[in-house]
Amino acid sequence: MDAQLKKGLLEVCVLSVLRGGESYGYKIISDVAPYIEISESTLYPILKRLEAADAVTTQSREYNGRLRKYYKITDKGLQKIDEFIENAREFERIYQFISNGGKL
């Protein structure tokens, strides 16, 4: 898969996990991994970009004597998911056109 395409898909996958409620890094990885390959070294830069874009907020809390960073989706993050879904519908129409030999 194209690296840029995968990066965009991973961002939306992370946001989709967070749409279900706040979460932390390891849990996000375990929720996304069955659908698309993701590692810690991939996830944390994505979370930083999403935070810089105001798509997620963070809060640190203690868990078993250590600080754990929790991520929560914002309205901008929800909007990014909606935009992705609309783009995916358009992509699906183009895919059907290509698959059908240039005919709809």
Image: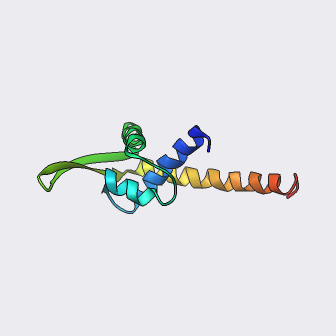
- Please determine whether, in this image, residue 53 is positioned above or below residue 19: above
What residue is drawn where x is 45% and y is 49%? 38
Q: Image quadrant of residue 93?
A: bottom right
Total marks in image: 0
Q: Nearer the viewer, residue 63 or 102?
A: 63
Q: Is residue 44 left or right of residue 85?
A: left
The quarter in which the C terminus is drawn is bottom right
Q: Is residue 97 left or right of residue 77?
A: right
Image x and y of residue 12, in percent: 49, 50
Quick check: can you spot residue 4? Answer: yes
Image x and y of residue 32, in percent: 45, 57
Q: Residue furthest bottom?
A: 20
- Please determine whether, in this image, residue 10 is positioned above or below residue 33: above
Quick check: can you spot residue 78? Answer: no
What residue is drawn where x is 24% and y is 48%? 59
The quarter in which the N terminus is drawn is top right
Q: Image quadrant of residue 22?
A: bottom left
- Please determine whether, in this image, residue 80 is positioned above or below residue 52: below
Q: Nearer the viewer, residue 6 or 81?
A: 6
Q: Residue furthest left?
A: 65
Image x and y of residue 62, in percent: 15, 52
What residue is drawn where x is 48% and y is 60%? 34
Q: Image quadrant of residue 31?
A: bottom left
Coloration mode: rainbow
